[in-house]
Amino acid sequence: MPVIFISDLHLSPERPDITRAFLVFLQHRAVKASAVYILGDLFEAWIGDDDPSELSLNVQAALRSLTDTGVPLFVQTGNRDFLLGQGFAAATGAKILPEQYIAEHFGQRVLVMHGDSLCTDDQAYQRFRRYARNPVLQFCFKCLSLGRRQRLAADLREKSTAANSNKASAIMDVNSQAVDGVMLKHGVTTLIHGHTHRPDRHQVSNGERIVLGDWHSLGWVLSMDENGYDLQSFAIPAMEQ
Ligand code: LP5
Ligand code: MN
């Protein structure tokens, strides 16, 4: 049975088609996997494990159904859902992984990451990242009401979209020295990440860098088995009006 890697679904109430495609994927595909890895940005914005929204509860229930069938589920956080925590892990049965994690399957060691920390040319983002990952700030944020957290998250999303429209595309991609450095540090020849929304397979100095795609009009899945990797996409059907 294959191991499956996905990332950047950006689930939100505005895109019920993607949520539906994900629930179908869990029921028909993920249940046949020997492990499922979600490498960050499962959600468009996660404001805390206490969010009682329909989307949050439905997705957590679906992930719990998956882990109840015995499929191990591993989740990394991304730059949109870095507040996913132990409440989410307890509700879903998922194991939350550190930012850099070595997955071992079929006799291979592979480094998995969300990928945002590799975008070192994007200095404005790296500054924001350090700020947003500050535990004291996160604690203060989680003390706010759900409504205020939602408004702050929406404000951050707006600022991010505006900032991105002024950034060169190359700046928002991974830095090749950062890639080489992290692969050397872990002694791996394969790195799998998401975040950049540029699905592809690249030969790099130390082996291969496989980039997962974001789910938009297409969904992306990387399947690994004893024969290697297969990066696949599929169409996400539109909702009937
Ligand atoms: O996300 P995306 O694709 O638009 O762009 C990312 C980088 N942007 C971000 C910001 C997120 O989108 C915000 C999501 C917040 C949801 C969770 C809320 C929890 C908040 C908890 C706070 C403790 O990640 C973007 C990159 C791009 O990827 C490509 O890599 O370029 O980086 C930026 O846009 C950063 C900007 O350059 C600067 C951001 C300005 C905001 C500063 C306001 C600070 C006020 C903070 C108040 C809490
Ligand atoms: Mn991301």
Image: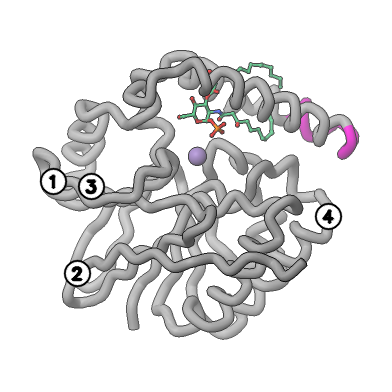
Q: Earlier in the sequence, mark 2 or mark 1?
A: 1
Q: Are marks 2 and 3 in contact (CB under 8 Å)?
A: no
Q: CA distance from mark 3 to mark 4?
A: 36 Å
The answer to if 146 sits in the magenta stretch is yes
Q: CA distance from mark 4 to mark 1?
A: 42 Å
Part of the protein shown in magenta: 139-147
Image quadrant occupied by the C terminus: bottom right
Residue 85: percent from left, percent from top: 65, 48
Q: Residues within 10 Å of mark 1 (few under 14, many from 20)?
A: few
Question: Looking at numbered disc 3 in the image, what kind of residue is underneath it?
Answer: Arg
Q: Residue at x 17, y 75 (%)?
A: 227
Question: Looking at numbered disc 1 in the image, what kind of residue is underneath it?
Answer: Gln
Q: Residue at x 42, y 14 (%)?
A: 123
Q: Are marks 2 and 1 in contact (CB under 8 Å)?
A: no
Secondary structure found at label 2: strand
Q: Which residue is mark 1?
A: 203
